[in-house]
Amino acid sequence: MDTPGRTVVVGGGPGGMLLAYLLARAGLPVTLLERHQDFDRDFRGDSLHPWTLELLDRLGLAAALLDLPHVRARQFRFRTPRGTVTTSDYGLLDTPYDYVALMPQARFLDFLAGRAAELPSFTLRTGAAVNGLLGSGTAGDPVRGVRLRDGTEIAADLVVGTDGRFSRVRTLAGMTARSQGATTDLLWCALPHRDGDPADADVDLYFGERHYVGLIGGPGRWQVGLSLPKGGYPALREAGIGPVRREIAQRVPWLADRVDLITGFDATTLLSVDISRVPVWHRPGLLLLGDAAHVISPVGGNGILMAAQDALAAAGHLVPALRTGAPGDHVLAAVQAEREPAIVTVQDQQVRVERTVARARERGRPMTPPGFLQLLTRLPAVRRRSARRNAYGPVPVHPTPELARALGMGPAPGTGTRRT
Ligand SMILES: Cc1cc2nc3c(=O)[nH]c(=O)nc-3n(C[C@H](O)[C@H](O)[C@H](O)COP(=O)(O)OP(=O)(O)OC[C@H]3O[C@@H](n4cnc5c(N)ncnc54)[C@H](O)[C@@H]3O)c2cc1C
C-alpha cells in the first residue's frame, strides 16, 4: 500500500491555514509552521468575500464562524467631492452570503486553527520560524523538508511556502518576485466607532487631491489607510502627525471628532504597497502560494480571497497526488497554471489604478473616478457585475468532484448568479 506524502506548510496566514486544514481534512499528514506564537496581527486584511463564505459553508464551518463578531459590508463605494459612486453591490448577488464579512484576521485564523486541531493528521507548531530548506530544489536534489531557527529539521515530501510577502522560503529557494510597479504607500491606523457613524461606510474609498483615504469597518473600530506617494514616508514623518490627522478629517469629516486619538506615528503602520509575482511558483519538492508567490495591493481588498483560492486550487491538485507520495513537478505546475491567470488579471488592474492615481497626483488633480463610471454604476447590472467579480475573483475556483468527496463537502449554498 502507498504511503501518503507528508506536507510541511510554512506560514499560518489565510493561505497556509486553509491549505493545511484542507489537506488534513482529506486525511493527509500535514504540519503547519508559524513563526509567531499566535495569529494576532493588525492591519492584515479582514475581509471574507462571498466566495470564501460559500466555501466555508460547504465545509460546514460558515455558521459557527459567523457567530463570531463581524460586520457585513454590502456595498463598495467611492466617495468623491462630486458625490458618491457605488461601484459594487454585493446585495444584488444570488447567494445567502451577499456581503463581505469584516472580521479581524486573527479571529478567522484562530477559528480555522481550532477546527484543524480536531483533525488527527494535522500538527501546528507556533514559534517555529523556518530559516533553511533541506535539499536544493533541483531535479536531482528536491526540497526534502525545512530547518527551523533552533536547528530542528522537519522532513517532508512537499514544502509549501505560504509565508507572505517577505517570504523566507522564496529567498531560500533562490526565487525572486518581479515587481509590476506600485506608486503608492499606505499609512494605516485604527479609530474607534462612535454613535452616529454612518451605517453604510464599511468598505469605502474617499478621494481628494493628492491623497485618498480607505476605510474598512469591523467590530468596534475603523481601519483607516491614508495614501501617500511611494517613498513619501520620511517627508510625512518630518511634517509631524498633524497633517495626517488633518488629511483624514478633511477627507472623512465624520472622523474629525477622533483624529486626535492618532497620538503619533507609533499609532500607525506603514504599508509599502507592492504588486509583484514570481515567474515560476515551484521547484522540485516546493510550491509557493498566496503573497509568497504574488503580492496583491491591499487597495481592492482581495489578498485574502486570492490566497484562499490558491489554497483550494492547490488542494484539488495535491490531494490525489499526495495519496501516493511526493507530488511531481507537473502537479505543482498545474497549480500555477490554474491560478496564474486570475492573479495576472487582478494585478494588471491594480497597476492601472496605481498609474491613474500617480498621474492625478503629478498633475495636482483630484483623484476622482471618471465621469463615465459615475454614470455607468447607476445601472444595477453594472454594480452586480462588479460585485460578482470582486466576490468570486476574475477566475473563480471550484472544488474538483474528487476533492469535494475527499473533504465531505456539502452542496453549493447559492448559484452566485444574477438577481435584480
Ligand atoms: C496593511 C495591510 C492591509 C491589507 N488589507 C487587506 C484587506 O482589507 N483585504 C484583503 O483581502 N487583504 C488585505 N491585505 C492583504 C492580505 O493581508 C494578504 O494578501 C493575505 O494575508 C495573504 O495571505 P498569505 O496566507 O499568503 O500570507 P500572510 O497572511 O502574510 O501570512 C504569512 C504567514 O507566514 C508567517 N511567516 C513568515 N515567515 C515565516 C517563517 N520564516 N517561518 C514560519 N512562518 C513564517 C507569518 O508570520 C504569517 O503568519 C492587506 C495587507 C496589508 C499588509
Image: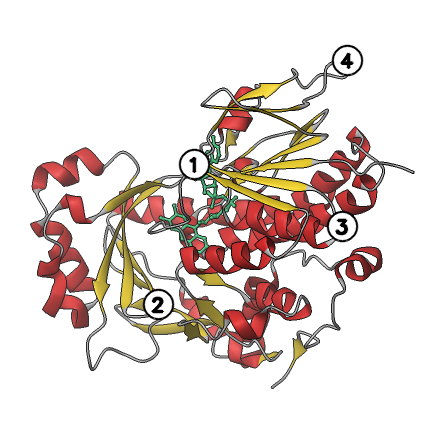
- Residue 235, image quadrant: top left
Q: Which residue is mark 1?
A: 127
The picture quadrant for ligand 1 comes to: top left
State the image coordinates of residue 143 (x, y, percent, origin top left). Answer: 67, 22
Residue at the image point whose x is 66% and y is 74% from the top: 416
User: Dot 1: what SS?
Assistant: loop
Which quadrant: the C terminus?
Answer: bottom right
Q: Is mark 4 within 8 Å of ligand 1?
A: no
Front residue of 36/121: it is: 121
Q: Which mark is residue 140?
A: 4
User: Dot 3: what SS?
Assistant: helix
Residue at the image point whose x is 32% and y is 80% from the top: 199
User: Dot 4: what SS?
Assistant: loop
Mark earlier in primary sequence (1, 2): 1
**Does residue 326 sit above or below 207 in this rendering?**
above
Spatial CA span between label 3 and label 4: 27 Å
Mark earlier in primary sequence (1, 3): 1
Residue type at mark 2 is Gly
Q: Residue reaching furthest bottom?
A: 420
Q: Which residue is mark 2?
A: 218
Mark earlier in primary sequence (2, 3): 2
Q: Residues within 10 Å of mark 3 (few under 14, many from 20)?
A: many
Left or right: 128, with 104 as reference point? right
Q: Which mark is residue 316?
A: 3
**Does residue 414 sit above or below 30 in this rendering?**
below
Residue type at mark 4 is Gly
Residue type at mark 3 is Gly
State the image coordinates of residue 341 (x, y, percent, origin top left). Answer: 67, 46
Residue at the image point whose x is 63% and y is 71% from the top: 57
Which quadrant: the N terminus?
Answer: top right
